[in-house]
Amino acid sequence: MEQQKQNVSLPDNAYRELKPGEEYKPLMPANTTPAEVTPYSVTMGVVMAIIFSAAAAFLGLKVGQVFEAAIPIAIIAVGMGTVLGKKNMLGQNIIIQSIGASSGVIVAGAIFTLPALYILGLDAEFYQIFLSSLLGGVLGIVLLIPFRKYFVKEMHGKYPFPEATATTEVLVSGEKGGNQAKLLAVAGLIGGLYDFIVSTFGAWTEVVSTRICAFGEMCADKFKVVFSLNTGAAVLGLGYIIGLKYAVIITAGSCLVWFLIVPLIGSVAPDAASLTPENIFTDYGRPLGIGGIAMAGLIGIIRQAGIIRQAVGLAVSELSSKKGSGAVQVERTQRDLPMKLILTILIAALITTLVFFHFGLLNNGMQSIVALLIVFVIAFLFTTVAANAIAIVGTNPVSGMTLMTLILSSLVLVSIGLNGTEGMTAALIIGGVVCTALSMAGGFITDLKIGYWLGTTPKKQEGWKFLGTFVSAATVAGVMLVLNETYGFTGDNALVAPQANAMAAVIQPLMTGGSTPWILYFMGAVLALVLTAIGVPALAFSLGMFIPMYLNAPLVVGGLIAWFVSNRSKDEKLNKARFDRGTLIASGFIAGGALMGVVSAVLKFVGIEWYMSGWAESKGAEWLGLAMYTLLIIYMAWHTMKAKKEE
């Protein structure tokens, strides 16, 4: 036992391409039978799925960015195992992480689309949110499994898998011991209390802008130039993990809109005096971002056409070889769910989706079949795009792909006579199913890569992922109803829900015959093409054009902290230790801030109102917010710099 503990380390060929004839042998070899699925691992996985679904839903609807739950869940799993004195936990921790990580991907699928139902004044029942999330998640799982060997084995060392790498390192270091869980808990407490005080009491302002002083007020009114910054701990942590490169690209999109397009429109529009910079951003900036996001998704499909062909061929050959020689023994670490079972689940999911569409939405046989075909074809085509994006950069362009889905499905549904309120509801539910399927596909490939590196049994990961999907879908449906009742998605102080607002803005004119800003969509699409041609990630830039400045600017602050702490020393090992410690602190800020945000929402939901609105809207609260944010930055940088190489 002790010998096994000391030798916990990934093989040296884990992250590089294999030489001819070389094999990768995982940490838990194929000829071993590690403990994986146990009452403890399943229970912990379900608890993590519930907690992080609630937290991710709140943060995603408020900020527009769903944090990846895999790393915090892995840290908590390692920490709990250590506290409880459990041994040989690697296999069980992978299952805990895999079940729990369903939370982030299901939440992303749901909150990017379904709040648009509320935004458009339509009814959204619990069963509609739950079923669209559940069925989308199931489709994402079964459509991805045939591609598992291609992405995780055949392409070994060719894709970096940044998130999977980080999570794997956490799980491996957990087997060696350490104080990571304690560090995460402390950071979570600080970040959680910080954001809780802001959202529950309004002790200081959450968003600081240049309107804080007279000169800034004049610039906003006369020149339509304003800069704003969210001072929350969770968003700061998000910027650290995203890193400086992508944070700068995202915020560059914001700068283009807020410092060029908004002032330009404000100087030439006939009614400029009555327009605020925020009005101009909503009417002109966001449609440009929508066009860019949609084009970025289309570029992704075109680029991955070859991968689709290769992966399908791999899956077909596997199915035919099993049929021809049923007695062939597949080693434990390459054992998937049987292809016949996958096909059975796929067919059952499609039939259930058809029944849901027919009886829960449309009451028209032909329209229900058309809706089902839209879901299946688009989900299948985009599955590999989602998986490939995660494998390369760790970012899933699911919102851009879902926008395309909504536009295509709306045009098709209108052509078969479905429009108006019923058409908008149907298109958004269809979009919800597709969005969740793509989000699950991208997230699940991370789990499977972690399992490949460490040597878990894919079959067990795949089977128990369905449980995590069910729990996460039920949780996000309940949380969304609570948040709608508490904050709402329209009006003052409403949740931002940026992606859902984009979906609503796209779909309403398509379904009701209103004016659609096609020229702005087209200009955004052209900009995405130009960005792609010069090597700038078009999706990140377009998201920056679409999401408000105050949510993007703090990402650069977090990214700058990450750059600062990881470049202060000439000792690369020390820089890495500092960066890794900062990642734990940032994860704590994200998880703690989001969780306390849910607690604050629940307090408001049950009628407990402690918010000091008069003070929170004052200049004094804004200056205090700036001061507290500065202290938070100093604390994060100082605490991160305390890291030692030995950690």
Image (cartoon, rainbow, N blue to C red):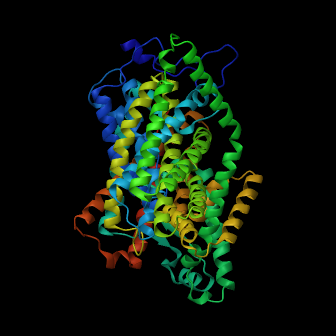
Looking at the image, can residue 590 be seen?
no
Nearer-the-camera pick, 611 or 559: 611
**From this viewpoint, which residue is outermost toward the front?**
365
Residue at 63% across, 51% down: 245
How many numbered marks does the figure carry? 0
Tell me the quadrant of the picture where the C terminus can be found. Answer: top left
Relative to residue 482, is residue 20 drawn left or right? right
Q: Quadrant of residue 467?
A: top left
598 is higher (above) or lower (below) than 167: below
User: Is 123 left, or right, of 158 in this rendering?
Assistant: left
> Residue 213's spot in the image, x, y percent?
50, 80
Asked whether 240 or 485 is in front, the reply is 485
Position of residue 28 measured from the top left corner of the image (x, y, whole percent): 46, 18
Give the image quarter of residue 227.
bottom right
Q: Position of residue 483 (x, y in %)?
A: 34, 62
Name the image quarter holding the N terminus: top left
> Residue at 29% across / 68% down in the picture?
201
Q: Quadrant of residue 111?
A: bottom left
Q: Is residue 378 above or below residue 528?
A: above
Residue 407 visible from this viewpoint: yes
Viewer-proximal residue, 597 or 336? Answer: 336
* Residue 608 horizontal side relative to residue 406, left or right: left
Residue at position x 53%, y 45% from top? Answer: 438
Residue under the point 55% across and 82% down:
276
